[in-house]
Image: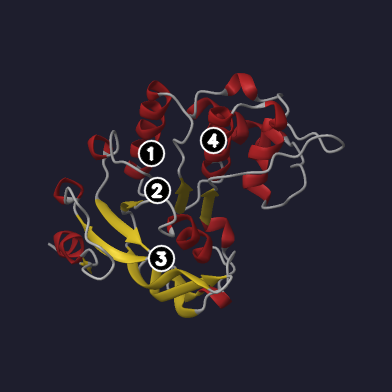
């Protein structure tokens, strides 16, 4: 079985500056991985690169064993971005319409068949926000919008979930509830890659591996072994989950 996601010597530049340099990281099927690092470390860029949203300066990416340039099974991925420009004015989009986009992969409001409505309602209920279904997206608070974007990523039942700072702007109680949801869907066999600043709450909820970025990969290992002070890019060493794969083979 090929890895679900592979970044191989991936480099990304913008405006003459390197954002990512020679990042190699593999995510196995059914794994729960957190990406950590300081602001500007390239965490969001790494996720966006996996979706083909930013061009590579070097390297290659594979999804489910297939080169990114040939990959077409986008329904197998769910993505919650860190930022979302909520449309307003002449294009008022409701929460249930936005979440429904996770089912049809379109930038147009979803046709609300009974099946779509049921799936959307289930996702909103899972995130504890069914009361927001009819609210215009541009009226949401930052924390509400984050939960809505996670619901959109979850609604399709995608095999691989890429979640960029999903708990940003939410209170502690909401964050803990969200992490319980992640633990539950990981328990169903789905693969999660979550960008976060800290690991509080995640380690207790089934997180398996942590990768630390600072333009390149500086450390990778088990959650309870994350060093107090992460190495600099010049010092970094990463182990690509060999322990986890060996454990599964056993």
> Which residue is located at x 30 percent, y 57 percent?
212
Q: Which circle marks residue 5 in the picture?
A: 3
Residue 182 at what x, y percent from top left?
A: 38, 38
Is residue 223 found left or right of 31 in the rendered image? left
Q: Residue furthest left?
A: 250
Task: Say above or below: 40 vs 245.
Answer: above
Label 4 to label 1: alpha-carbon separation: 14 Å
At label 2, counting other C-alpha atoms closer than 10 Å, the crowd grade (few under 14, some 14-19, many 20 or more) is many
CA–CA distance in space, label 2 to label 1: 10 Å
Q: Secondary structure at mark 2?
A: strand
Q: Quadrant location of residue 235?
A: bottom left
CA–CA distance in space, label 2 to label 4: 13 Å
Residue that numbered label 1 is attached to: 182
Depicted 152 relative to depicted 59: above or below: above
* Sequence-first disc among 4 and 1: 4
Q: Which residue is mark 2?
A: 194
Residue wearing tag 4: 146
Foreground: disc 2 or disc 1:
2
Which is closer to the viewer, label 3 or label 4?
4
- Contact (Cβ within 8 Å) of mark 2 with mark 1: yes
Earlier sequence position, callout 2 versus callout 1? 1
In this rendered view, identify the residue nearer to me: 6 or 239: 239
Furthest toward the bottom, the residue is 58
Residue lying furthest front: 16
Task: Give the structural element (helix, strand or loop) at label 1.
Answer: helix
Judge the density around disc 1: few (<14), some (14-19), many (≥20) Cα neighbours within 10 Å: many
Residue 66, compared with residue 39, is above or below; it is below
């Amino acid at each position: 079985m090929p890895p679900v996601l592979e970044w191989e010597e991936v480099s990304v530049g913008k405006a003459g500056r390197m954002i990512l340099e020679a990042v190699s990281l593999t995510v196995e099927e059914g794994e729960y991985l957190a990406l950590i690092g300081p602001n500007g470390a390239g965490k969001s860029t790494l996720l966006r690169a996996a979706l083909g949203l930013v061009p590579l300066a070097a390297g290659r990416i594979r999804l489910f064993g297939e080169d990114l340039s040939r990959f077409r099974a986008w329904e197998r991925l769910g993505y919650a971005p860190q930022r979302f420009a909520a449309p307003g004015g002449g294009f008022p989009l409701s929460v249930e319409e936005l979440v429904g986009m996770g089912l049809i992969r379109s930038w147009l409001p979803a046709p609300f068949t009974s099946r779509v409505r049921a799936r959307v309602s289930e996702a909103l209920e899972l995130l504890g926000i069914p009361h927001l279904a009819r609210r215009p997206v541009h009226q949401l608070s930052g924390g509400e919008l984050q939960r809505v974007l996670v619901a959109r990523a979850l609604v399709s039942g995608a095999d691989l979930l890429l979640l960029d700072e999903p708990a940003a702007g939410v209170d502690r109680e909401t964050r803990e509830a969200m992490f319980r949801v992640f633990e539950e869907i990981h328990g169903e066999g789905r693969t999660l890659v979550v960008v976060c600043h800290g690991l509080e709450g995640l380690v207790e909820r089934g997180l398996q591996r942590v990768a630390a970025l600072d333009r390149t990969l500086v450390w990778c290992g088990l959650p309870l072994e994350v060093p107090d002070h992460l190495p600099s890019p010049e010092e970094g060493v990463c182990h690509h989950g060999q322990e986890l794969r060996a454990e599964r083979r056993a």
